[in-house]
Structures are given as structure tokens and as C-alpha cells.
Amino acid sequence: MSAPRAAAVAHRAAAGTVCLIVFAGAGTGAALADDNGMADKSAQAIADASRKAMSEVTSMRMVAKVTEGAGTTGLDIRFDEAGSCVGSVTPPGGSGRAEVIKRGDDVWMKLDDELLRAQAPGAAAEDAIALIDGRYLHGTTDNAMLRDFAQFCDLDHFKKEFSAKPAGERLTKGPTTTVDGRPAITVTGKRGGDTGTYEVSTQDEPYLLRIQGAKASGERVQATFSAFDEPVRAQPPAPGDTVDLSELR
């Protein structure tokens, strides 16, 4: 599976699982209110408040592991509503890593040698390694190779998915906990054969700090969220560090 395709698979799996109940993000570097009252609310009220908070965010960081039939995809992505995106993807199998930068319609992706060898047989991989020479591949969102990843960077898509109220959700309020030192309240939910555990901040805005979910199909997701409303610095590589995909045809 290619790195862009792996990212797209993770996108769909993550969105489908987290949409089970509620979604939002972790806070900014500003001073935080000590108690936002979430711990005293019902599970449904917590979910509703978190959906509202998510619908208003302008950027976020997502660190996730999504496991499905092909294996586990690892993601560490920052993206915003302007279409900027920066981060890394580890495709299923754990062979290599892709670094990705997106700004507007332009996408830059750097596949390390291990990943290139995992994606191409023998001599073809070595030829690709020599040709690319450690540089970023550059193309636009119109390029078939990069299109799936460009869709993954669409924060507006996530916001629509996460702020929607799933039909038939059954929510249960759980205990208080902490996520990376930040206080949270747990909400668990079931819908059909899908289950999820969600930890929503009880400090400042009711952002979702962590999710662990499983779908009836066997897909599993673990993710944490942070850096909400912080700038996404998607700085393009220097021209000498890139190679245009059109040159590789």
C-alpha cells in the first residue's frame, strides 16, 4: 500500500470510528480555565458540548494509530481549515516513513529509503532511491498519487464528520481521568457493534483529548488531539530539496 493510500485509509477509518459519538481537540497554549463543568454533566450533554467545540476549531494536531486488515497505519499530522498540513505517515507493516507538507494545492512528500524499498521490487526501488536522492516529491492535489493524501488534510471534512450526531448512539458517563496531565471525563458509547471510549477535557473548552475505538469490522483506532487553533507552519522545502513528479514520468 502506498503512503498516500495508507493515509487515506487511516482518514476513513479514523473518521468513521470517532464519528461514533463525539469529537473535538486539545487546547492551546493560553491560560486554561480550571473547571469547565463537564464532569458534572450527563454523557449526552458532554457529547453535545464537545461537538460544538469541535465545530469551531481552526486547526489541530492528530497523533493516531489505525489498525485494519492491511495492518497499522501511524499518523502524526497538523492541519488547518486553510488547507495547510504537515506531518508524517507510517504505512502498515512499519516499513519506513513518509513526511508530508501541503500548502494550498501544492503537496510535497518525502519517502525514506526503507519505505521506497517496501513499495517497489528489487532494482526498481534502488533506481527510485538514486533518482529521488533524499528529496521531496512535489505535485499538486490534481496528481493521482497525491490526491488521497490531499483529502486526508481536509479539516473541514473532519469537522463535519465529528460535529454530526450519529443515529442510535448509546452513551455512558465514566470516571474522571487525565490525558498527558490534563484532567478529563470519560464517555463510552456503543452503536451496533462499534464501541468507543472518549476522554473529554474538563479544563477550558470541552475538547476531546483521546479516543480509543473499535468497529464491528475489526478496525481499531487510538488517537490523541492537541494544538487546537495553533498555526500550522507548512513551510515548503527549498527548491533544491524537491523533484517534480512530472520529471519522473
Image (spheres, rainbow, N blue to C red):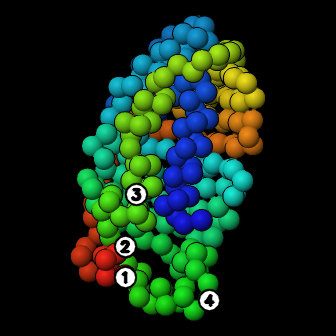
* Residue 67 in picture, x, y percent from top left: 68, 50
Residue occupying the point 53% across, 19% down: 165
* Spatial separation of the CA atoms under disc 1 and disc 3: 17 Å
Give the x, y percent position of residue 73: 61, 55
- Residue tagged 1: 248
The disc label shown at residue 137, or none: 2
Q: Residues within 10 Å of mark 2 (few under 14, many from 20)?
A: many
- Do tag 1 and tag 2 residues touch (Cβ < 8 Å)? yes
Q: In the image, what residue occupies the spot 48% across and 85% down?
A: 129
Q: Secondary structure at mark 4?
A: helix
Upstream in the sequence, badge 2 or badge 3? 2
Between the residue at mark 2 and the residue at mark 3, the CA separation in whole angstroms equals 13 Å
Rendered image: mark on residue 122: 4
Sequence-earlier tag: 4 or 2: 4
Q: Residue 51's spot in the image, x, y percent?
A: 47, 21
Work out how far the residue at label 4 is from the one at label 1, CA to CA, in angstroms: 18 Å
Q: Residue at x 48, y 31 (%)?
A: 161
